[in-house]
Amino acid sequence: MAEKPDNGRRTDRTISQLVSDGARVIPGKSHGWFRDWFRKVWKVRGGGLYAVGFAASFLVFEIGSLSDDILGIGSLFNGHAIDFIVQLLIDSFTNTLKAFAWPVYVVSWAPPYGVIGLGAAYAGFAKYLKKPIEGWLFPGEEGADTR
């Protein structure tokens, strides 16, 4: 029978059991991690539609480049670990720069409709979405407007 230390956890667990337990914890904690990251973006980018667009476009660009990086993960085992890490950092920096210009992507997406959609988003965001988002980001804080 496995020995139990003072904290009640088993000490003879396999690596796969430890990874599995960690994978169950990550979704519960990621909500807090995401909120903390988004709260920082919200404050730095002015707390408006631009902040939401920056965060959303960064995530979209990052997920797209990570899928490419995951396909190239075999290079880690071929002795190209430094190349893989450098490419990952370059992709993240490039995705950040592209996320700063997210309105350009919206406008160029479908030329007359992109401009109309962006204008409508800016008009409707302050009226309908800003207060609920601030309530989620800053629970319990009165007057959470960051400007």
Image: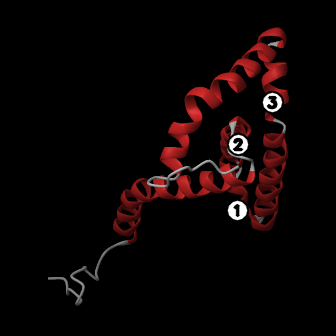
SS type, badge 2: helix
Q: Which residue is mark 1?
A: 76
User: Looking at the picture, how far across and down is residue 14, in whole percent?
Assistant: 34, 72
Q: Residue 129 sits in which quadrant?
A: top right
* Of 51 and 110, the residue lying toward us: 51
Q: Residue 21 sits in which quadrant?
A: bottom left
Q: Of the residues under marks 2 and 3, which one precedes in the sequence?
A: 2
Q: Of the residues under marks 3 and 1, which one precedes in the sequence?
A: 1
Q: Residue 6 sits in which quadrant?
A: bottom left
User: Looking at the picture, how far across and down is residue 130, in whole percent?
Assistant: 59, 36
Q: Which residue is mark 2?
A: 51
Q: Of the residues under marks 2 and 1, which one precedes in the sequence?
A: 2
At x 28%, y 83%, the residue is 11
Marking on residue 103: 3
Tell me the amino acid under the disc marked 3.
Pro
Q: Residue furthest left?
A: 1
Q: Residues within 10 Å of mark 1 (few under 14, many from 20)?
A: few
SS type, badge 3: helix
Where 127 falls versus 61 (above or below)? above
Where 8 falls versus 23 (above or below)? below
User: Looking at the picture, how far across and down is residue 81, in whole percent?
Assistant: 75, 66
Q: Residues within 10 Å of mark 3 (few under 14, many from 20)?
A: some
SS type, badge 1: helix
